[in-house]
Image (cartoon, rainbow, N blue to C red):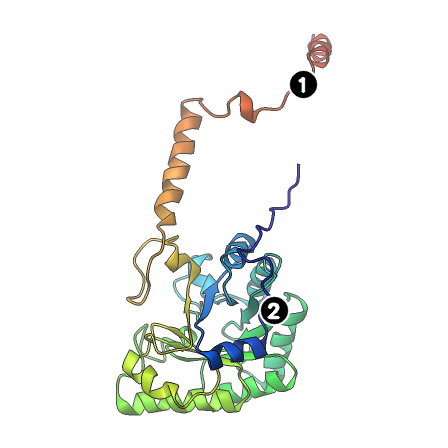
């Protein structure tokens, strides 16, 4: 019996792996880019089979699977394990590893070392970092110059949510919106191949889109972006609660998980499980011999 879960055939087996030129071409052609987070092998296999373009092993893993109340506690070591697991489930989407809080802010050298580990040890194709201030743009440039593609992230950047005044939409005044635009341009100037816009009024995104040349992937940033990203656990309803207002639920797996575990518990308590079909057999003469040995 194989212990390796099988990788399901993608819906289009002839699908080409996503590359940076292909991504830029999608923007040029106005084809919407689909990105989703994944944190392990099964979620990556689902993203592969569904034919998404980009998979992000987000530091949202801290809240979705590690049970923290914010993204800041997740460590680089944890992110490397999760990213490597996702890598093993992917063939065609571009895999982006999120750089966790504390793993790139100190210096360009620290940022490059962290990004190199994401690529060498976890198999990421690219990395993402949060923020577009001068320091973040400098880190992005250093990593790009080291040969690793970088995705930027502006608007609500959860690693700095305390400094931003909480988990709330950003860019709701003209100066704040202009600052987001300037940060996005700085990241683009640093060589980022794409930028995430998170929790920004749709009208602000629409205004900024004409100024950005690289693909913009939105999450709570309205429909004008080149693509959308959602957190795996939010879109599939794997965790309790509705999440932020921009989340659209496409399934309710948490309820199904409870129903499944409850049914199993009932079966065990009623001694309905395991049945003969779940049990291994032994040849009658071997059983006879065992009984003799046991006296
Ligand atoms: O960590 C994450 O999941 C993210 C996405 C929400 C873009 O940064």
Task: Please state if 267 lies on the left or on the right of 103 as rendered.
Answer: left
Q: Position of residue 38 (x, y in %)?
A: 50, 60
- Where is mark 1, residue-wise? 282
Against 76, residue 285 (above or below) is above
| Any part of residue 98 in sight | yes
Mark 2 C-beta closer than 8 Å to ligand 1: no
Q: Position of residue 136 (x, y in %)?
A: 50, 85
Q: Residue furthest left?
A: 173
Q: Quadrant of residue 211?
A: bottom left
- Where is mark 2, residue-wise? 124
Disc on res. 295: none
Q: Compare residues 89 and 53 and report the one nearer the observer.
A: 53
Q: Position of residue 12 (x, y in %)?
A: 55, 58
Q: CA distance from mark 1 to mark 2?
A: 47 Å
Q: Quadrant of residue 224?
A: bottom left
* Number of disc labels: 2
Against 21, residue 210 (above or below) is below
Tell which quarter ligand 1 is in. Answer: bottom left
Q: Quadrant of the C terminus?
A: top right
At horizontal 48% and vertical 84% (from top left) the residue drawn is: 214
Q: Position of residue 260 (x, y in %)?
A: 40, 38
Q: Secondary structure at mark 2?
A: loop
Q: Compare residues 17 and 42 and report the one nearer the observer.
A: 17
Circles 1 and 2: CB distance less than 8 Å?
no
Q: Secondary structure at mark 1?
A: loop
Q: Quadrant of the N terminus?
A: top right
* Mark 1 or mark 2: whose residue is earlier in sequence: 2
Against 24, residue 90 (above or below) is above
Against 224, residue 62 (above or below) is above
């Amino acid at each position: 019996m194989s212990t390796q879960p099988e990788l399901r055939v993608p819906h289009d087996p002839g699908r080409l792996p996503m590359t940076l030129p292909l991504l830029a071409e999608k923007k040029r052609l106005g084809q919407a880019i689909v990105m989703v987070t994944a944190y392990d092998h099964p979620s990556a296999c689902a993203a592969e089979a569904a034919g998404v373009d980009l998979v992000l092993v987000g530091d949202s893993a801290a809240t979705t699977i590690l049970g923290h109340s914010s993204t800041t506690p997740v460590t680089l070591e944890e992110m490397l394990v999760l990213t490597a697991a996702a890598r093993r489930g992917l063939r065609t989407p571009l895999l982006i590893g999120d750089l966790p809080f504390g793993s790139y802010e100190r210096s360009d050298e620290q940022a490059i070392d962290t990004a190199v580990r994401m690529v060498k040890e976890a198999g990421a194709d690219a990395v993402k970092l949060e923020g577009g201030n001068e320091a973040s743009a400098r880190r992005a440039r250093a990593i790009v110059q080291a040969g690793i593609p970088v995705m930027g992230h502006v608007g609500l950047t959860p690693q700095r949510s305390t400094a931003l005044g909480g988990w709330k939409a950003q860019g709701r005044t003209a100066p704040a919106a202009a600052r987001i635009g300037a940060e996005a341009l700085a990241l683009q100037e640093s060589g980022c191949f794409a930028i995430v816009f998170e929790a920004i009024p749709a009208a602000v995104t629409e205004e900024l889109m004409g100024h950005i040349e690289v693909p913009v992937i939105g999450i709570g940033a309205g429909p004008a972006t080149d693509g959308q990203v959602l957190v795996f656990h939010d879109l599939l309803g794997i965790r309790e609660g509705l999440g932020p207002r921009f989340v659209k639920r496409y399934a309710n797996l948490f309820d199904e998980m409870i129903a499944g575990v409850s049914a199993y518990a009932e079966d065990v308590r009623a001694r309905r499980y395991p049945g003969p079909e779940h049990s291994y057999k032994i040849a009658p003469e071997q059983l006879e011999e065992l009984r003799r040995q046991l006296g």
